Image: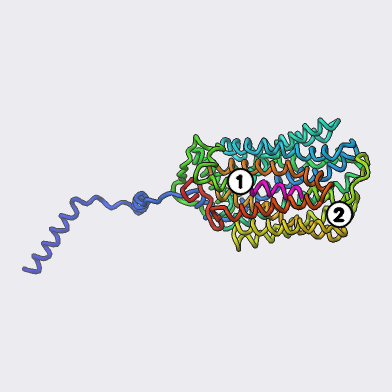
């Protein structure tokens, strides 16, 4: 009876338990219910990009943005060839030669912040598409300029369009996983070096037969190609999220997953943007307390980078044109066009950018961004000081080769650091502002590299050395090291 009573109690308890309990849901409903109660059922663009990794999507984007950089490089390299050619064709003075270079950088300086605002407000793709069309249009018009004043005006408009090119780095960096970002952005400089070498090679063939106007026209071909492929550029997923368009951002991330052959992340795409949609793309936010020191120091670094890089490019043709003796021209009306040996030496010094790029990749991952830039500035200052011992052409070429590689890698290291240290809502504006300030240094450098150098090579090289050492101190004073740091969507006290 005790045993039967026990069975009876179990049956009663079972009936009591069965009455209030609802039927068990299917396995799928159990899984969905368990997901719904997880508090972190979300992911950010950074998490998605890191999870999807580097693949075919990034390879295609590398080629697209690399073409933009190559076209920009050709337009910049032509400045060192244009000045001596115009001196011979239109008998312009040294100050007018310097003005030919300065007007381009003036256009870039005035437009950099403008393009940054366009990029942050309307998208990176929109800004780059406008840039490609305008750059090709003004480049073609400058090739048929009837006189010096028209050429100055049109080259200024070319500079205005070039001011948008740095936004291609912003777009590129926002699609790169954290581990590969520094290497890929630095390797992007290979396209810049390739464009510079291509421009020198084209000039070597075209200048002796067709002249400078045909060189200007042929140099716009990469710009035309870039303008044609702009509709296939992807828009930044970070921009879409920050601008309140998560559906478009999710579609872009799904495209990355498809191209890279990776499974798409499950959950809801979010972005906690503390800057706010209404405050995107404003220059004044670069000087808020958390970002003020970083912005001011970066402006010094970028200004010195452009001052030293373009100064070295212009000094190269000036030193080759003057010769090892350093003697000045007998008369302003005399003309000495660049010879085949000049173009070959210019090509060799331009090729120095490739080893400079690969050295920067190794150093920047080992020592970090700040130390890398500081070390490179110091080495560049030492190389420039050695230029005063201009004893023979071989020695001059070797020193310029080393200095060109160092400053090229340094400039790209600055392009790595800047997008990493700013949040999404201000990233394009920050890169545009840094690029604009850099053009201020580039505007001044022709008067040092082309005018002051003719009077005193010691003073000219001393100016570049001082600027490089000052920038090295600014690199060490930067408050944040971004090595291994994810790109952020928000502004925090540690940003």
| Residue 429 coordinates in the image, percent (x, y) | 58, 40
Residue 201 can be seen in this image: no
Secondary structure found at label 2: helix
In which quadrant of the rendered view does residue 102 lie? Answer: top right
Task: Please determine whether, in this image, residue 215 is positioned above or below residue 7.
Answer: above
| Residue 439 coordinates in the image, percent (x, y) | 69, 42
> Could you say which is closer to the camera, residue 349 or residue 250?
349
Residue at 76% across, 34% down:
138
Task: Please determine whether, in this image, residue 264 is positioned above or below residue 276.
Answer: below
Q: Which residue is mark 2?
A: 344
Label 1 Cα neighbours within 10 Å, binned few <14 / some 14-19 / many ≥20 = many
In which quadrant of the rendered view does residue 378 lie? Answer: bottom right
Residue 462 can be seen in this image: yes
Q: Which residues are magenta?
A: 296-311
Instruction: Tell which circle, 2 or 1, labels the residue nearer the N-terminal end.
Output: 1
> Could you say which is closer to the camera, residue 410 or residue 116?
410
Q: Which residue is mark 1?
A: 170
| Residue 401 coordinates in the image, percent (x, y) | 78, 58
CA distance separating discs 2 and 1: 34 Å
């Amino acid at each position: 009876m005790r045993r039967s009573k026990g069975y009876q109690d179990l049956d009663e308890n079972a009936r009591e338990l069965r009455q209030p309990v609802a039927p068990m849901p299917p396995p799928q409903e159990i899984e969905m219910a368990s997901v719904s109660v997880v508090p972190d059922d979300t992911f950010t663009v950074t998490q998605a990009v890191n999870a999807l990794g580097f693949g075919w999507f990034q390879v295609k984007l590398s080629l697209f943005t690399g073409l933009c950089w190559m076209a920009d490089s050709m337009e910049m390299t032509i400045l060192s060839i244009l000045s001596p050619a115009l001196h011979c064709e239109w008998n312009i003075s040294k100050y007018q030669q310097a003005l030919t270079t300065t007007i381009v950088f003036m256009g870039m300086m005035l437009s950099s912040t403008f393009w940054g605002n366009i990029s942050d407000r309307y998208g990176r793709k929109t800004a780059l598409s406008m840039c490609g069309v305008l750059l090709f249009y003004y480049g073609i018009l400058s090739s048929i300029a009837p006189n010096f004043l028209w050429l100055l005006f049109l080259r200024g408009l070319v500079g205005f369009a070039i001011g948008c090119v740095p936004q291609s780095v912003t777009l590129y960096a926002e699609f790169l996983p954290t581990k590969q970002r520094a290497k890929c952005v630095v390797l992007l400089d290979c396209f810049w070096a390739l464009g510079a070498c291509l421009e020198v090679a084209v000039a070597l063939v075209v200048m002796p037969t067709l002249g400078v106007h045909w060189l200007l026209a042929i140099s716009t071909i990469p710009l035309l190609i870039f303008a044609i492929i702009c509709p296939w550029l992807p828009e930044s997923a970070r921009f879409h999220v920050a601008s309140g368009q998560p559906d478009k951002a999710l579609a872009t991330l799904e495209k990355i997953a498809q191209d890279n052959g990776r499974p798409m992340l499950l959950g809801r795409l979010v972005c906690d943007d503390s800057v706010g949609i209404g405050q995107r793309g404003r220059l004044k936010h670069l000087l808020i307390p958390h970002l003020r020191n970083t912005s001011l120091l970066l402006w010094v670094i970028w200004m010195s980078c452009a001052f030293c890089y373009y100064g070295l490019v212009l000094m190269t043709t000036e030193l080759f044109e003057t010769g090892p003796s350093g003697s000045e021209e007998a008369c302003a009306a005399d003309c000495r066009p660049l010879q085949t040996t000049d173009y070959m030496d210019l090509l060799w010094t331009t090729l120095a950018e490739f080893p400079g790029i690969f050295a920067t990749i190794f150093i920047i991952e080992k020592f970090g961004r700040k130390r890398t830039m500081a070390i490179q500035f110091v080495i560049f200052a030492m190389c420039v000081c050695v230029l005063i011992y201009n004893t023979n052409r071989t020695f001059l070429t070797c020193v310029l080769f080393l200095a060109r590689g160092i400053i090229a890698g340094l400039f790209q290291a600055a392009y790595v650091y800047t997008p990493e240290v700013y949040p999404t809502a201000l990233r394009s504006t920050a890169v545009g502002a840094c690029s604009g300030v850099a053009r201020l240094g580039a505007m001044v450098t022709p008067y040092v590299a082309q005018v002051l150098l003719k009077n005193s090579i010691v003073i000219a090289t001393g100016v570049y050395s001082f600027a490089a050492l000052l920038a090295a101190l600014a690199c060490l004073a930067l408050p944040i090291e971004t090595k291994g740091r994810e790109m952020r969507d928000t502004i925090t006290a540690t940003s």
